[in-house]
Image (cartoon, rainbow, N blue to C red):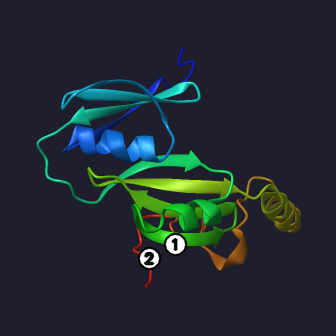
């Protein structure tokens, strides 16, 4: 039986540069073997930095880090790290995307529970109008059924200048 996520491994062309990047973001370093491996603690989950010979490029990871205030994070780091997008309001929270030195794209997420509660209420209301619970309600705000980058996920869109 799976009990938890223990580690997320990110491939890095330059492990030492990635170590500096994640330290700058305030992650707690567990250990670092120069040019070979590094680990950081983020709650109960470890983030491992593994060397690769692949050149850095846009690599969507699916890793989402929750932050208290996405806009404050953006304002604090916008001149120091690469943002793939400025903060954007989504139906479930505020999102932004950053890129580490290895090309890994990491999403930042600030939940907005009040908006999620409103969304759930709207979906329940739509579901009750369908007549059966077996029919899936369409998502709010005119998006297609199911997940897509326009309605729920940030993706890796570049920030506008």
Report the residue at 66% width, 78% height from top: 142
Query: Is 22 left, or right, of 18 in this rendering?
Result: right
> How far across and how far down the image is residue 74, in percent?
55, 65
Residue 159's disc is 2
Up the image or down, 29 lies above or below 153; here it is: above
The answer to which image quadrant residue 112 occupies is bottom right
Q: Tag count in the figure?
A: 2
Report the residue at 45% width, 64% height from top: 155
Residue 63's disc is none
Q: CA distance from mark 1 to mark 2?
A: 5 Å
Q: Nearer the viewer, residue 80 or 108?
A: 80
| Residue at the spot of label 1 | 86
Q: Secondary structure at mark 1?
A: strand
> How far across and how far down the image is residue 100, in percent?
34, 52
Task: Name which of mark 1 and mark 2 comes first in the sequence.
Answer: 1
Q: Nearer the viewer, residue 68 or 148?
A: 68
> How far across and how far down the image is residue 42, in percent?
53, 32
Q: Secondary structure at mark 2?
A: loop
Q: Nearer the viewer, residue 99 or 155?
A: 99
């Amino acid at each position: 039986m799976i009990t938890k996520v223990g580690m997320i491994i990110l491939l890095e062309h330059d492990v030492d540069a990635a170590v500096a990047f994640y330290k700058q973001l305030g992650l707690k370093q567990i250990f670092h073997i120069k040019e070979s491996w590094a680990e950081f603690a983020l709650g109960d989950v470890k983030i491992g930095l593994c060397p690769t010979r692949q050149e850095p490029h846009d690599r969507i990871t699916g890793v989402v880090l929750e932050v208290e205030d996405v806009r404050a994070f953006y304002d604090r780091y916008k001149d120091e790290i690469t943002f793939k997008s400025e903060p954007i309001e989504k139906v479930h929270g505020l999102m932004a995307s950053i890129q580490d030195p290895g090309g890994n794209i990491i999403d930042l997420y600030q939940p907005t529970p009040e908006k999620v509660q409103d969304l759930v209420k709207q979906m329940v209301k739509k579901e009750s109008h369908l007549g059966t619970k077996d029919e899936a309600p369409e998502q709010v705000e005119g998006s297609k059924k199911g997940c897509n980058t326009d309605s729920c996920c940030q993706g890796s869109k570049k920030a506008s200048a």
